Image (spheres, grey):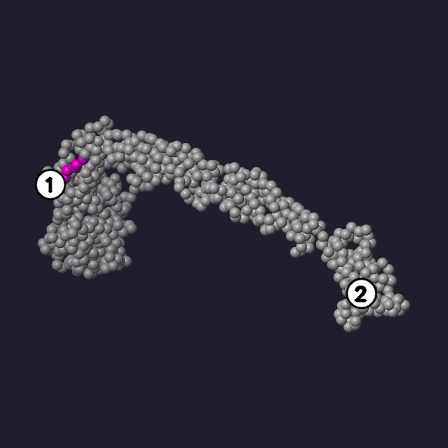
Amino acid sequence: LRTQGFTWLLGESHRPLRRAKRRWVITTLELEEEDQGPFPKFVGELFNDMSHNMSLIYLISGPGVDEYPEIGLFSIEDHRNGRVYVHRPVDRETTPSFTVYFDAVDRSTRKVMDNSLIFNIRISDVNDHAPQFPEKEFNISVKENHPAGQPIFQILAVDLDEENTPNSQVLYFLISQMPSLKESGFQIDRTSGEIRLSGCLDYEMAPRFTLLVGAKDLGEPPLTSTATVHVNVQEGNNHRPTFTQKNYRIQISEGCTSQSVLRLLVQDGDLPFTSAWRVKFHILNGNEEGHFDIFTDPETNEGILNVIKPLDYETHPVRSLVIAVENEELLFPCEGGQVRGPGGAAASATVSVQVMDANDPPAFHPRSFVVSELDGARPGIQLGIFNATDPDRAASRIRYKLAYDPANWVTIDELSGTVTTRQHIDRESPYVNDSFYTIIAHAVDDGLPPQTGTGTLMLFLSDVNDNAPALHPHSRYVEVCESVLNETLLLQAEDGDLEPYADPFTFELDKLWESAGDTWKLGENRGRSVELLMLRSLPPGNYSVPLLIGDKQGLSQKQTVHVRVCSCPNGVMCGEPSAAVTGTGLLVGALAPPCAAFMLLAGQSSAGGIRPRSSEEGQQTLIAYNDEKTSLTAGDREQPALRGPSSGAWKGRARRGRTQHLPSLSLAFLQKLCGMDVLAGDTGDPPHIYAEEGECERAESLSSLAFSEPDPWASKAAPLEEIYSKSGVPS
């Protein structure tokens, strides 16, 4: 082969490039890989046509000759000709070609006579590599409901022979499948290596498959390799649960609830205790009134039927229930070798329920009704009639009894069920709630055993004006500093009646009271409260202010405000008095310590007078009279005040700003305690002394306990008994 007009690359001697007419003549140099010889083996020959005019020496160099990757692979027979030999087999996959340099040198001058010839010795491929899988074994998982025809895995093999030749082209095939099932088969695409499912998987039949896959090239001869694929089937719901029995018959007594009246057994081919095996039940028909429910036994997978609402023989003696069952997991059944979509008709069973007759309690018609009556209704008024019937038989004899009448206001006729008042009715009774009074009756039949029904009568009491407004307990006892003029005290009133018999209230000072106009005055009326103002300074003491309080309809009554005028060292709060006096001239210090102690305890149980505070009232303090007191001497007594109770009334040493008052009933109780000895051997804290040593005198009346010295204000002092009787405060 003669080539002309080419520019050749520099050799390793860095000979300069020059364009010259090529004189090299070569034959094809191509070597087949893995040639087994014998060696050395002739590869090809080349020469330079300048050898006709002079004697030449041929030289060869480059990779495969004197350079890596393989040194000494090629050589020239002798330097007189260009015959090239190879000395051992060549691996194309290691070195697919060799680039060698040929030179022609003048034998006599050793001068290079021509440009170097750079030539590629190509190694031709032979099929010496079988396809190789990346692993010998593969483990994959496939869901049981995997659809047929869809790939589950792709397996690939690599052939190291020359690309795009038959030697490297790989085809795949399935050698074997274990176990071999007609319903569950596998296929492999011969060119892509995708493994596909044919048919349906069944975990219960075969939880694991082993596939032997082969790969071969198209070389001559073809080479083959194999790999193993382990397919693990994941459990899925492909078996429909079914009842072991299609029809059931049970008997249930009426009027009662019952647990586990029937257990329904089902069977399922999926793996036990998985979501594909566990079932849930539904009552499709026959439970419209909610008498039954059903749940699943987690251990046995049975359906447990319960009666949660009593059945009635007279209404439905026979019932038919249709119960369906399905798995917790969606069902993907295999039909005709194909996995079908989720859903489908659920299996069902029929339960025939026969209700057994029993003695039912009487039924009230209606069970509850409302009757209206005026507040204060007299005895003998018919309020209403209870009506009950026996659902079992019309001729049954029913007796009525009162079951709930907390105020004992009514009677009921045993035979007719008529409810009649037996005493006056009071809407303000604590047994009345929001104007309703509840009466409950029982109806008892004559069955065996007797049964009892319950009915309710709600008595609505219309209000009448039977309560006059009265002072709120916190407004009956108030106090004010003596140095403060025009002090505003807010008095609140209350009425047990409803609209229109309650507020707004009217407030008036008692016109018969002598000093009303110059000492006290009523201010702004706020509907349920009024302002009381002190017009002039009063000496310390206790005063009574009578009021007339009326409701919206004019019903009124007299009430008394007890005002304590006290000295206030700090100008805003009452100071502690030096002595304590209670009742009409009753000196606490005159009693023996046990009497005084019990009197103070009785004061705690009496109605405490706590004066309400408002933004207009300024700083006012309520005084507590149930605390320990200092001893009282004659020098501690104070002069009685204008229009107040007896000298020294309500005076006492106070702490924490509370006020308590001792009613006359407590005083009578204390009189019986006079003369009792102090408990001996008491190791506790010593009692506070309230009086000088001496015997406790027995008193025939409260007046005998007053001070022995004359009281210049006695003629104008109002006794506490009179104040309590006029104000409505219990004595």
Which secondary structure lies at badge 1?
A: loop
Identify the residue shown where x is 18% and y is 52%.
493
Q: Residue at x 24, y 33 (%)?
A: 314
Q: Where is residue 43? Give x, y as percent.
A: 79, 57
- Residue beneath disc 2: 25
Considering every residue shown, the one lying at the far left of the view is 512
Marks 1 and 2, how far apart in space? 149 Å
Element type where label 2 sits in the image: strand
Residue 278 in picture, x, y percent from top left: 44, 38
Mark 2 neighbour density, 10 Å: few (under 14) some (14–19) many (20 or more): some
* Mark number displayed over residue 378: 1
The segment highlighted magenta reads 384-388
Residue 553 visible to the viewer: yes
Mark linked to residue 531: none
Residue 516's quadrant in the figure? bottom left
- Name the image quarter holding the N terminus: bottom right
Is-magenta flag for residue 385? Answer: yes
Image-based side of 463 in relation to 320, left or right: left
Q: Does the magenta stretch include residue 389?
A: no
Q: Which amino acid does label 1 sit on?
A: Arg
Q: In which quarter of the image is residue 436?
A: top left
User: Against 261, is 21 above or below?
Assistant: below
Q: Which of 201 and 523 is in front in this view?
A: 201
Which one is in front in this view, the residue at disc 1 or the one at disc 2? 2
Which residue occupies the foreground of this view, 17 or 561?
A: 17
